[in-house]
Image (tube, helix red, strand yellow):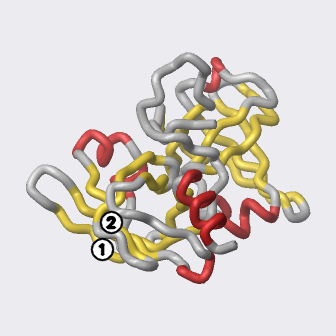
């Protein structure tokens, strides 16, 4: 489990395909604190550490992960939001995040406002994922509050700190992002459809 509060930005330093799998090597300022078999969220995607070498570590994404996320689109030098699994007993500053991306979305608008930046995203409404006004959403691993909730569209308002310390500063219109919808909302949605 994660909180959606980004600890650090990592840099992709190697990308290697092996059959259907993709091995990504990430340079991080907390690599020395990691251990093999530990989970780390990369743009909201929970991946397992399989190799540690100095200030870099490697994770493996399988076909299912590559099909449902933007992880396969990463290139050398790209930055990723990083978060280690939450510790029991710590404060839950974001919201409960599983690290299981539901689908990707597309950034359709970026609007500078007085003191914040409004990002708008669309997603596939055929997947039965929903947002609600003032509900939680995870975008590239960042725990955020939904504004302007529509059937297949929503916005989030980003404060300057979040903009400057996450991959939001690199997003452009048409950027593909990972979306994890609120776990409680997913269960309620599933129950009401039965």
Q: Are marks 1 and 2 in contact (CB under 8 Å)?
A: yes
Residue 34 horizontal side relative to residue 77, left or right: right
Mark 1 secondary-structure assignment: strand
Quadrant of image for the N terminus = top right
Give the percent coordinates (x, y) of residue 137.
46, 55
Give the percent coordinates (x, y) of residue 149.
35, 70
Residue drawn 81% across the image and 36% down it = 50
Q: Nearer the viewer, mark 1 or mark 2?
A: 2
Q: Nearer the viewer, residue 52 or 13?
A: 52
Q: Establish if 17 lies above or below 174.
A: above
The residue labelled by disc 1 is 109
Q: Establish if 189 lies above or below 166.
A: below
Mark 2 secondary-structure assignment: strand
Residue drawn 55% across the image and 61% down it = 178
Question: Alpha-carbon neighbours of circle 1 within 10 Å: few (<14), some, or many (≥20)?
Answer: some
Q: Establish if 159 lies above or below 56.
A: below
The residue labelled by disc 2 is 155
Classify residue 21 by image quadrant. Answer: bottom right
Residue 54 horizontal side relative to residue 125, left or right: right
Residue drawn 65% across the image and 64% down it = 191
Quadrant of image for the C terminus = bottom right
Residue drawn 47% across the image and 29% down it = 92
């Amino acid at each position: 489990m994660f909180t959606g509060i980004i600890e650090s930005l990592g840099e992709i330093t190697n990308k290697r395909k092996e059959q259907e799998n993709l091995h990504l090597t990430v340079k991080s300022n907390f690599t020395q604190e990691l251990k093999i078999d530990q989970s780390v969220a990369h743009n909201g995607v929970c991946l397992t550490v399989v190799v540690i070498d100095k200030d870099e570590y490697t994770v493996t994404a399988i076909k299912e992960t590559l099909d449902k996320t933007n992880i396969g689109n990463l290139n050398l030098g790209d930055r990723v939001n990083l978060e280690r699994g939450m510790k029991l007993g710590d404060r839950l500053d974001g919201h409960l995040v599983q690290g299981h991306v539901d689908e990707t979305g597309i950034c359709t608008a970026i609007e500078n406002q007085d003191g914040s930046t409004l990002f708008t995203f669309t997603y596939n409404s055929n997947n039965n994922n929903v947002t609600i006004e003032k509900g939680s959403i995870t975008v590239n691993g960042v725990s955020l509050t939904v504004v302007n909730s529509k059937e297949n569209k929503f916005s989030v308002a980003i404060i300057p700190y979040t903009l400057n310390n996450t991959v939001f500063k690199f997003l452009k219109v048409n950027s593909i992002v990972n979306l994890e919808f609120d776990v409680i909302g997913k269960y309620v949605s599933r129950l009401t459809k039965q």
